[in-house]
Image (cartoon, rainbow, N blue to C red):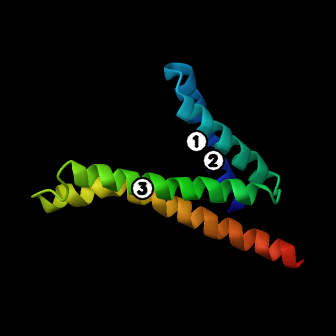
């Protein structure tokens, strides 16, 4: 499972670096570098990688708060219940990934520390 999370971070890094190439975005560069570091570190099972994952997950939590702030500012919840629920799906999925990745990485490295 750790390799799968590493692969996801690697794909995210590639996507971010494409964004840097296309749009010259500083946030995409930062996100791509962090994701690449997490991918390499997790793939090689380095202990420092867990802290990169924790930082990325904390950033995702802050992003979700900012996302919700923007939704509420734009008149959320909407009159249509389905539209309100659908507008939460992208941020909620990203938040769930961040929490799940952190929890899994914590368990893996905690067990390795005991050995």
The reply to whether callout 1 and callout 2 are in contact (CB within 8 Å) is yes
Q: Secondary structure at mark 3?
A: helix
Residue located at (11% from left, 58% from top): 80
Of the two numbered discs 2 and 3 in the rendering, the one whose residue sits closer to the viewer? 3
* Quadrant in the rendering for residue 105: bottom right
Label 1 to label 2, Cα distance in Å?
5 Å
The reply to whether callout 2 and callout 3 are in contact (CB within 8 Å) is no
Q: Secondary structure at mark 1?
A: helix
Residue 15 rendering spot, x and y as whole percentages: 56, 34
- Of 37 and 75, which appears nearest the observer? 75
Residue located at (77% from left, 74% from top): 110
The residue identified by callout 3 is 64
The residue identified by callout 2 is 9
Residue 92 rendering spot, x and y as whole percentages: 40, 60
Q: Earlier in the sequence, mark 1 or mark 3?
A: 1
Label 2 to label 3, Cα distance in Å?
18 Å
**Tag on residue 12?**
1
Give the residue at the far left of this rendering: 79
């Amino acid at each position: 499972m750790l390799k799968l999370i590493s692969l996801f971070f690697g794909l995210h890094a590639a996507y971010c670096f494409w964004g840097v190439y296309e749009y010259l975005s500083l946030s995409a560069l930062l996100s791509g570098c962090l994701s690449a570091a997490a991918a390499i570190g997790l793939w090689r099972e380095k202990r420092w990688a867990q802290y990169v994952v924790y930082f990325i997950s904390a950033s995702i939590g802050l992003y979700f708060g900012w996302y919700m702030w923007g939704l509420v500012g734009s008149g959320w919840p909407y009159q249509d219940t389905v539209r309100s629920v659908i507008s939460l799906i992208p941020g909620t999925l990203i938040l769930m990934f961040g929490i799940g990745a952190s929890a899994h990485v914590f368990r893996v490295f905690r067990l390795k520390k005991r050995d």
